[in-house]
Image: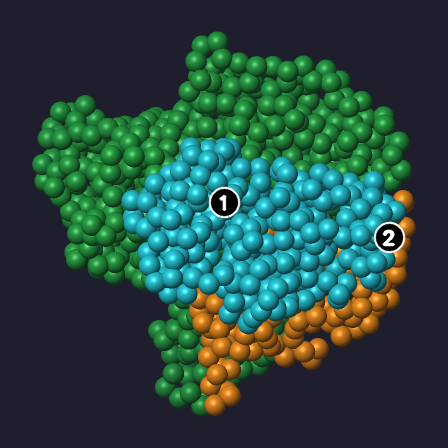
Amino acid sequence: MKDFEYFSASSLQEACSLISQYKDVGKVLAGGQSLITLLRQKLISPTCLIDIKGLKELDYIEFDKKSGLRIGALTTHRAIEKSPLIQEKYNVLSEMEKSVASVQTRNWGTIGGNLCSADPIGDPAPSLIALGAKLKLVSAKGERIVALEEFFTDYFTTIIEPDEILAEIQMPPPAPNTAVEYMKFSTIEAGIKIVSTSVAITVEAGSDVCKDAKIVMSAVAPIPLVTKKAAEMLKGKKLTDDVIEEAAKMAASETDPTSDVHASAEYRKEIVKVLVKRAIKKAFEKAKKA
Amino acid sequence: MNGSKKTINVKVNGESYELSIKPKMTLLQLLRNELGLTGTKQACMDNSCGACTVIVNKMAVKACSVLAMQVNGKEVTSVEGLASRDGKLTPLQEAFLEHSAFQCGFCTPGKLMSSTAMLEEMSDPTEEDVRRDMEGNLCRCTGYVQYLAAIMAVVRQRKEGSK
Amino acid sequence: MNERSVVGKPLPRVDGKAKLTGKAKFTTDVVLPGMLHAKLLRSPLPHAKIRSIDTSKAEKLPGVVAVITGKDTWGIRYGFVDTPNYPAEERPIAEDKVRFIGETVAAVAAIDPDTAEDALDLIEVDYDPLPPVFDPVEAMKDGAPQIHGEITRTTSCAWEDWGVARKSHSYTPVNNVAARVLVTYGDVEKGFAEADYVREDRSRSPGTSHMAMEPHTMVASWDPFEQKLDVWMNHMAYELKRYWLHKTLDIPITKIRIHKTYVGGAFGGKAPCYDYEVICGFLARKLCKPIKIELTREEVFSSCRNSHRFDINIKTGVKKDGTIVAQHVSVIVDAGAYKCSAPVAMFLSHAMCDPCIDRKNVRHEGVAVYTNKNFNFARRGHGAPQMRLAADCQYDQICEDLGLDPVEFLLKNLRKKGDVCPNGDRLDSYGLPEAIKKSAEAIGWKEKRGKQRDKNRGVGIGINGMFSGSGYWPFACTAIVRLNHDGTITLIEGDCEFGQGADTAYSQIAAECLGLSLEDVTLISSDSELCPMNYSNFLSGGLFVGGGAVYNAAMNLREKILRVASEVMRAKPEDIELKNRAAFLKSNPKRSYTFTELMRYHIQKHLGDPLIGYGYKKAVPEIEFYPSLSKGTGRFTDAYGFTASTAEVEVDRETGRVRVLKIVVADDCGFEINTAAIKGQMVSQAVQGMGDALFEEIMDDEGRVLNPNLVDYEVPRAFDIPEIEVIDCSDYEPKGPFGGKEAGECARAAVISAVVNAIYDATGVRVMRIPVTPERMFNALKAQGK
């Protein structure tokens, strides 16, 4: 590992001023669960790290019936997984968090750090996108709100400016007659995801008709992929097995996966079909009961 | 930008230290190289095997992936801090011994720290909880069975003890 | 001695407290004053000439102490196989040519690891790329790039030193063939002519990683005054490593001391000599400074030994009733850039197969081929898992073809207890029939086999046999048992504790022999200076040979104690028993003398002799010379361990993902010295075998390892573990200590076949290439339209 200068920010304001000062050579350090490996492998060698992990002001889970859920960017994965509030109102997040790396990583790693690392196989992004998450980005100059769907631009790349810090993840209140399901597929149980998907289904109350749908996949494109055609096709339809299967096939056709040691591109497409089908079914069943 | 040394205060296994370190030092290097606590092991260096697991403020973390600077002001427990100084093992260590829950012993300190933290956090975990929580600790020798049995034995013991 | 109180029990391990408190010293924990750290520069090309190396910039980096290249170590050769026909060709640092990505081309010693690593980036190597070849079949074709020129004899080989072999000679491999083996017995053509049914199949087992948790590490310190090298290292038998260090560094063998450290897992992968070990010793002596070399996980995957890729063509002839009458096996072993143990692996693929099934007429031919890839060594079973996959899956298919039951088929074709194998090995213990029956029963064979395909579930069976040490090398071991003042003993024996439980099992054996408890044993082990000669802890010879030597030494002390007790008590030795550090009359236990009293008496009356037991054991006592690797003749081992394994799986037909529901391991390892440790060995192999069957493969592209880390090379974790049932089917081995024999390697192979056969039962699709990853299974299902 190369040497670097280290600053520990004591407030968000200080962090913003540090990052605006060092934006060309610095990196923000949160839990570092990806960053430290990258530093060790010399894949990145910033000359300065601005440590924000200690900022209590960005560590919270708050809910309001009107405005929904707000999670501070430095909330750990484990805190989200174990939060009774999230388990009750956004259970998919709690379930999804169980798939994030290991307990040790979830204990130290933060949700904001995870999103900013923009790993195409990251667990949280698909579910958060399916839930309609928005991000609050702050800098010394001010703040802006962006949809998580618009956040990622390429492998390990986001729209975040070098002087910005991700401060908060926001989600609307749980929609009625809606369920969100997360499913992953890997060779070993806790292995690298070959494909994962999060599906949100809203049904017309008391019917089998799909009112709204969102299908998000990871590991099949450089960024979390939000299907357009497949979700659109479900809307207004009775969710029969045939319709669901058709949507899953359509979702697969929208992906552009690559081959690696874990799976070929062709196989990933096949798995998308199965996983999306299963996730729609499960979400559909739950939505009917919701 | 020379990575000049910084001072941290950290409590390790009950002892308070003031140390001057390079910012790039990981918690694992701090324990092994600065303090000579070599019970915490290095096996993968990419946050995947769990052999370096220690407890920081009651949470299991992988010491290879935490900068030492980040434990400034915190309490760290490594495997050396489990048994009492006069040689009394913890119930979990006793269970490991009784169930032959280890072989080469290289991943054992990490497993002990993970499961110690888990048993602190969860009062009555099921076997499935235990397996899921131990996903982060890789073992090549044991095949996990006897080690999971040791943890479950402590869970049962504790339940019986509290009755 | 009839009632056993220490052996046969699940006693806590003697290394337990050290390992549970962080006190246990592994090589990676060794720190010496003034120690430098060395890092190795690895070749980025699979095959290239080295035109020049410029180390000047690296040498100037502050903190760098020395940079060495092949020029410094030119001419040093070593190898696991170092025989008259096949002299060693490995070298610590590439000289004029690199042969695989990851081969060492230079080494830097510096004040800390980061500085050494930074210096590597400053070394400039001018390569002239050569055409590489990666596939063994391609490599054997005329016109393929030749990886080795003439392999010249540089130092005398070990066998020559021991006076049992002729001088090695130089040779030039033709078409990259590193070695060949041809074993035949019976009349194969006649056998096939008599067969009612003949089947031919192909299987492939990939290269896999041992994945021991402790990355390979060594620390060496040179004492310039004594001209002596002190070493702490990852090994499985210090005699092997010490011998290689002695030969490669030209240091007298007694001027090298290998100190005891615990070894963080081995599984075969830490036995051979490594480049970094020679370099570490070389630098320590050159700089007169302690040197530590700690390999990274990536280096372990890309530059340390992995298991051999085997491609096997197997043809078997059977009678209608399933009786095997002939078998022809052709094995192609992908050796990699250097042959290392490849000649042994392809020989063992026959030798370990032979005691299980009586195939009557056999032709087993093998070729080991050089390729421009990292090279390989034994991993838990050394050739047996690869061979068993081919054989057991074919037997399973033959049964399907002929409407036979695989369990009945195996039972029909087994050898029998007391049989003498064609090479002369005698099966004095043979628990395999019982293991097959019990493993089948435990999985619910009768109710489930062929009856659960509608549920995508199936069961399968596999078997294996494994040496308990062998006739190679001077495979023998010595032990000393010292009686102490307080009536306790000190056991001195060389075997290394790498997780298998040697320290505990040997202490139990010694205690049992003398009527002591485990706490009465102080152990001195795994130190080349303190322990007597020791070649036993590989090829699963530890318990049988090392433990046998301990048994003999302790029994020798027992005899001596009985003799002095009989003198003191004026009773016959057979009327005296030893218990709780005392000798007493069987007929009148109150009449007793403590060991302390007997020892004092003996010192007074017998010229100061404090009573020391001494014992030894040779792996195969009857042979004087070594069996032939290339012809497969001569004795192999004195006792085989056996396993039968069954498995139940469920296959997700939509994704191809296989889930193992249950694994049964029924094992004959002879008398179980420590029942908890034996269970640990069996579970361990069940899980490793499952990993082999479903997940594990070193993947490469043009010679570059694509998954050299624990994220991308996936091994089973806690949540992947199925129900595992271990059944003791031990058959008393009369030549082993208390009837014990091999326990650590046999089961893995049987588990692999069991899982793969269960997949067939679940799906009707035969996959004979492992690992059966979800994608491979998916494609196989698709290809067969199922």
Q: Nearer the viewer, residue A64 or C24?
A: A64
In the rendered image, the vertical position of residue A45 relative to residue C150, given as above or below: below
* Quarter containing the C terminus of chain A: bottom left
Indicate the chain on which mark 2 is placed.
Answer: A
B30 or A31, nearer to the observer? A31
Q: Is residue C387 above or below residue C239?
A: above
- Asked whether the residues under the numbered discs 2 and 1 touch, taking CB atoms below 8 Å apart as contact, a structural biologist would say no
Q: Which mark is residue A17?
A: 2
Residue drawn at the location 24% of the way across and 38% of the way down? C786
Horizontal side of C646 relative to A283 (left or right) equals left
Say above or below: B85 vs C81. Answer: below
* Label placed on residue A217: 1
- Give the percent coordinates (x, y) of residue A90: 52, 63
In which quadrant is the N terminus of chain A drawn?
A: top right
Residue at image coords 64%, 45%: A151
Outermost residue, top side: C143
Q: State the separation of the CA atoms marked 2 and 1.
A: 36 Å
Chain C shade: green
Mark number displayed over residue C309: none
Q: How many marks?
A: 2
Q: Check disc 2: other Cα within 10 Å, few if <14, some if 14-19, many if 20+.
A: some
Could you say which chain is coloured cyan in the image?
A
Residue B32: percent from left, percent from top: 74, 58
- Is residue C257 at all visible to an observer of this figure? no
Q: Is residue A166 visible?
A: yes
Chain coloured orange here? B
